[in-house]
Image (tube, rainbow, N blue to C red):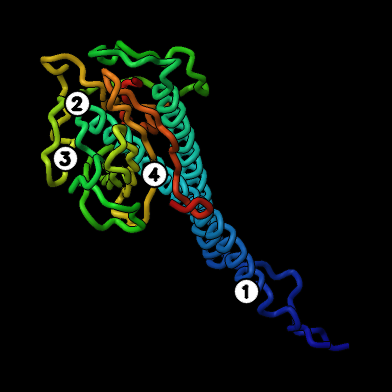
């Protein structure tokens, strides 16, 4: 009979114990870190959405008070809706620490007394649109009134 | 009969016991430290996430033009968050209302709205656009989330 069969088993058990609890603690810290990261991402997403929302509202109000904004061939706007943040920028604003740029698309019909303007917002330095709103300005009425025809948040499932 | 070369009644020496205690102590201290950090971070994350949700709710509440009609030059007192459902231990307040000065954009170039937002109501009256700052915070002071929204006068 070999009386030293169990020699060294204590070390193995101790190492297994340390590894097990090390992994458990590592996993818990990793989970906590992931939660913090998700909260941070959520905050950034909130900032982006509200910055885009605010920029759109601001652009609508600026265009409401200035009837040339978005009129046919307005040099501050474009002929068609942009898919990237290139071309003239109508308005820029900073809210929640996020910069939002609004690109407008002018009315297509030069003889239409009312303006139908599309505002596309790029926020947070992104090159893809965050939101897009198409707005009808009743320039013939006094004071000028606004109808928001559509207000879309661009995402994975919604193209703008 | 020859005796086995083992000493079944032999115990551990004091040095062995001390080394064991030190190792176990260090290990458990590390484990408890990790656990406490994890619990603290988790609690902070939950508090921040809840404050974020309260901030979003307050922002939507404030933007709602039926519940909170546009207040011309009303200041923070012109709007109310009364009735906003908030979890216990959290609150939301409107800290400031700023106003668009109504400056018209140039015929070319980009209009920088931030340079046309001011703290005081414009001399000619409200121009129909305000920047409202809302702060949602936890009563324990762990989390405070700020959200800025633009409120437009609905025509």
**Chain ID of residue with mark 2:** B
Closer to the eye: label 4 or 2: 4
Residue B96, visible in the rendered structure: no
* Res. B103 in view: yes
Q: Which badge, 2 or 3, is on the more N-terminal residue? A: 2
Q: Identify which residue, A57 or A29, lies in the foreground.
A: A57
Which residue is labeled 1 in the image?
A11
Real-space CA distance between mark 4 and mark 2, rounded to the nearest whole angstrom: 22 Å
For residue B142, side relative to residue B31 (left or right): left
Which chain is home to disc 1?
Answer: A
Q: Of circles 1 and 3, which is in front?
A: 3
Image height of B48 relative to B21, above or below: above
The CA distance from mark 1 to mark 3 is 69 Å
On the image, the x and y values in percent for residue B30 come to: 49, 56
Front position in the image: B148 or A157: A157
What residue is rendered at 19% in x and 31% in y?
A: A66
Q: Label 4, on which residue?
A: A132
Q: Which mark is residue B100?
A: 2
Give the mark toward the camera: 1 or 4. 4
Q: CA distance from mark 1 to mark 2?
A: 72 Å
**What residue is at 26 percent from the left and 29 percent from the top?**
A64
Q: Determine whether A38 is above or below A93 in the image.
A: below
Local SS, label 3? strand
Q: Are marks 1 and 2 on the same chain?
A: no
């Amino acid at each position: 009979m070999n009386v030293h069969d169990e020699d060294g088993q204590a070390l193995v058990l101790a190492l297994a114990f340390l590894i097990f609890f090390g992994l458990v603690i590592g996993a818990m810290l990793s989970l906590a870190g992931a939660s913090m990261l998700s909260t941070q991402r959520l905050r950034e997403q909130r900032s982006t959405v509200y910055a885009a929302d605010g920029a759109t509202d601001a652009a609508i109000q600026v265009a409401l008070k200035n009837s040339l904004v978005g009129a046919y061939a307005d040099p501050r706007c474009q002929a068609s809706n942009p898919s990237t943040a290139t071309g003239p920028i109508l308005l820029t604003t900073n809210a929640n620490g996020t910069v939002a740029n609004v690109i407008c698309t002018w009315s297509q019909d030069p003889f239409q007394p009312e303006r139908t303007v599309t505002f596309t917002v790029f926020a947070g330095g992104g090159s893809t649109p965050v939101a897009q709103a198409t707005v009808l300005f009743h320039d013939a009425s006094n004071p000028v009134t606004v109808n928001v025809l559509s207000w879309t948040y661009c995402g994975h499932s919604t193209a703008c | 009969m020859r005796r086995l070369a083992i000493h079944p009644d032999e115990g551990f020496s004091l040095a062995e016991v001390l080394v064991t205690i030190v190792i176990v102590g260090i290990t458990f201290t590390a484990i408890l430290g990790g656990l406490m950090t994890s619990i603290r971070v988790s609690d902070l994350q939950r508090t921040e996430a809840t404050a974020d949700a309260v901030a979003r709710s307050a922002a939507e509440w404030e933007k709602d033009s039926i519940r909170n009609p546009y207040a011309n030059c009303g200041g923070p007192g012109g709007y109310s968050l009364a009735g906003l459902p908030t979890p216990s231990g959290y609150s939301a307040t409107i800290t400031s209302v700023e106003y668009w000065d109504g400056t018209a954009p140039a015929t070319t170039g980009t209009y920088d709205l931030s340079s046309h937002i001011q703290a005081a109501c414009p001399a000619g009256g409200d121009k129909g656009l305000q920047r409202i700052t809302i702060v949602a915070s936890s009563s324990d002071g762990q989390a405070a989330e700020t959200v800025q929204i633009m409120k437009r006068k609905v025509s």
